[in-house]
Each structure stands twice: as C-alpha cells, then as structure tokens.
C-alpha cells in the first residue's frame, strides 16, 4: 500500500531532471500521474514528446500515467494540463510546479525577450497551472490537496547573471506564502522547494565551478528531491504549509522566512542624522543574525 494511493498528481516539466524523478517516486507510492513537458531546449525553444518516455517508465512500474505536452507559459496550457488530469482520472490532488528554463545574462546584456520568457515559464507558469486547481478546490470543496512550487537559491540568495530567473524564483516563494493562506480553509497546503541537483540546467555550471559530476552519486542527482516532495504530499504533512524546504547536495534543510529582526520607532519623521547611526546599526545586527543562522543551519548527520 503506497502512501499516495488514490491521489492524482500533475507534475510540470516532468520529462527529465527533477520532475521526472518526482513522477517516478509519486507513482511508486501509488499516485496516478499527469506527466507534463513541452520537451523544449534549455532556453525554452523547441518542443518534443519526451513526456511519453516517462509515461512508459511509469507504466512499466505497473502504475498509471498520461502525457501532456502543453506549455505552462500560457493560460490555455495551464487549463489543458489540469484538464488532462480530469479527463484521464476524474480528479486532481497534487500539483508540482516544476517546469523551468534558463536565460542567464547580466542585466547589461539582457534583452526584453530573456526577461519575458523567464517570467512566462516560471512565475506566470505557476499562475497558469495553479489557478485551475484552486478553482476546482473551491468549486468542489476538495480538501487535502498539495501544491509544491520550485524556487531556487538563485532567487532566495541572489546570483550573478540571473536577475530574470532570480526575480521569478523569489516571486515563487511569495506566491507560495500568499496562496497558502488562501487555500488553508480547504485543508490544502502550499510549499516551496529550494532544490539543487545535477541536471541539464546545471551540469555545465557544476563542472565550470571545478566540481566533478558523478551520475552514481545520489547527493548530486535529481533523485534526492523526489522523496522530499513525495513526503510533503502525504497525510503526514497535512499541517506543513508555507515552508521553504531546501534539498541539495544530500542536505535537507529549511529556509528562514523574511522577518523583522530589529527595529526602531520615533515620534517624528526620521532625520538623516538619526539614520546615519540607525541604518548601520540595523545592518550590523543582520550580520550577526546571519552568522548565527549559518551556524545553526550547518547539517547534522542523521
Ligand atoms: N537543477 C537544479 O540545481 C535546480 C536548482 C534550483 C531550481 N531548479 C528548478 O527546478 C526545476 C526543474 O529543473 P531541472 O533542473 O530538473 O531542469 P530540466 O531542464 O532537467 O527539466 C525541466 C523541464 O521543464 C520542461 N519545460 C521547460 N519549459 C516548459 C514549459 N513552458 N512547459 C512545460 N515544460 C517545460 C523542460 O522541457 C524540461 O524537461 C526548474 O523549475 C528549475 O528552475 C533546479
């Protein structure tokens, strides 16, 4: 008996990489799967039916799956992806917003098209695919659904050459926090994953950073994200919502959320002379706070 029997999961961008591993893991736990993938290149161009290969692998496991080739980047595509689940299985319980591309450039060199397509696939993709599900949740009073969104340290921490991707990925964390409040009354959860794995998006970056990629090392591979996502979809995770769970390099962690860590108040409008001392004091406090958090966040072996 799998932990996800009787659940129907939609996984976007699931023809390869992290999404594919999530499909296989959820299927092994008993979920029926919609494998969505546009089948394009790393920069979002082109297309193909690579979702079929994952459907075949799932069928070989004795589980059920259907393919969908729509782009998450359009409202129409989002509706079609959701309808694939309804047409094939008559219900939807889990959505993993995973599809992704890269158009890395510094802002000096970034064209409008590089900005737009990243927003379209990543940030608007979350809107396009999630809206049909939440309307269904509301209209049918469906409970215990799970929405899992893919962010990135590129947005959460910042990364040179990725203002477009970073803005979208930070936006996805914000999307998660607000949506978690909206679906809470239906006992549905929304969480963010901050993943890290060697895939076609990252292998060349890993190698350019002087690290060797070993496909047999699970701490490098996309398979490490799958059990984390699967667990968040189980009943055991019914009260876990609005979190950012980090899974990378064999490390499982939780990110802090934005919070005020020190503040001042005053009776009159701030003067520049006051701010001469107050803002540096706030910044200094944050430095200590970050050091403390970094120390606490070091991985404990289990
Ligand atoms: N690999 C990492 O280290 C890493 C780090 C941080 C975040 N992420 C995020 O994780 C997710 C998965 O990335 P991955 O590393 O597995 O990459 P990947 O390239 O292996 O897989 C992404 C898949 O998304 C599909 N896709 C792209 N645009 C699409 C669209 N418009 N509609 C439907 N499918 C589309 C691609 O065809 C591809 O198969 C992405 O959102 C990525 O930004 C990955």
Image (cartoon, rainbow, N blue to C red):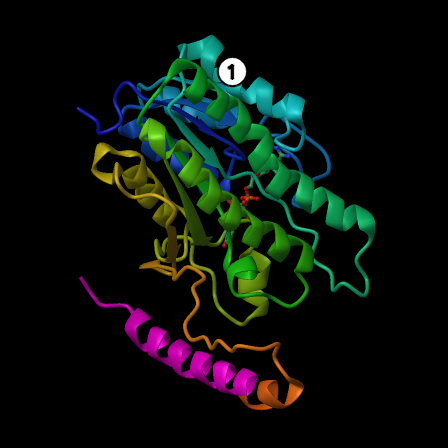
- Residue 64: image location, x then y, percent: 37, 17
In this view, the residue in front, 253 or 39, is 253
In this view, the residue in front, 139 or 113, is 139
- Residue 264: image location, x then y, percent: 47, 77
195 displayed left or right of 124: left
SS assignment for the magenta stretch, majority: helix
Q: Residue at x 32, y 59 (%)?
A: 253
Q: Residue at x 79, y 58 (%)?
A: 110
Tag 1 residue? 84
* Residue 294 inside the magenta-drawn segment: yes
Query: Is residue 291 among the parts visible in the rendering?
Result: yes
194 displayed left or right of 45: left
In this view, the residue in front, 144 or 274, is 274
Q: Residue at x 51, y 82 (%)?
A: 283
Q: Magenta residues, as a range?
A: 278-302
Per the image, label 1 sits on a secondary structure element best described as helix
């Amino acid at each position: 008996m799998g932990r996800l029997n009787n659940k129907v999961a939609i996984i976007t961008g699931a023809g390869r990489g992290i999404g594919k591993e999530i499909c296989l893991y959820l299927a092994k736990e008993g979920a029926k799967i919609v494998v969505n993938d546009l089948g394009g290149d790393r920069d979002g161009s082109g297309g193909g039916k690579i979702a079929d290969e994952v459907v075949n692998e799932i069928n070989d496991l004795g589980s059920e799956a259907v393919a969908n080739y729509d782009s998450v980047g359009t409202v129409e595509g989002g509706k079609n992806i959701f309808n694939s689940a309804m047409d094939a299985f008559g219900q939807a319980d889990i959505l993993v917003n995973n599809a992704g591309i890269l158009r890395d450039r510094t802002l000096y060199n970034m064209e409008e098209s590089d900005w737009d397509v990243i927003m379209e696939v990543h940030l608007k993709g979350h809107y396009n695919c999630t809206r049909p599900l939440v309307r269904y949740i509301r209209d049918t009073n469906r409970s215990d659904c799970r929405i899992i969104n893919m962010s990135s340290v590129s947005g959460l921490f910042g990364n040179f050459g990725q203002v477009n991707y970073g803005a979208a990925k930070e936006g996805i964390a914000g999307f998660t926090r607000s949506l978690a409040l909206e679906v809470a009354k239906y006992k549905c959860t929304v969480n963010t994953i901050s993943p890290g794995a060697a895939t076609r998006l990252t292998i060349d970056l890993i190698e350019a950073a002087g690290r060797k990629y070993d496909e047999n090392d699970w701490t490098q591979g996309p398979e490490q994200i799958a059990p984390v996502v699967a667990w968040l979809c189980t009943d055991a995770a019914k009260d876990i919502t609005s979190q950012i769970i980090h899974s990378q390099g064999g490390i499982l962690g939780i990110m802090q959320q934005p919070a005020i860590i020190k503040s001042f108040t005053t009776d009159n409008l701030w003067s520049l002379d006051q701010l001469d001392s107050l803002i540096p004091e706030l910044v200094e406090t944050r430095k200590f706070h970050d050091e403390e958090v970094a120390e606490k966040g070091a991985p404990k072996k289990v």
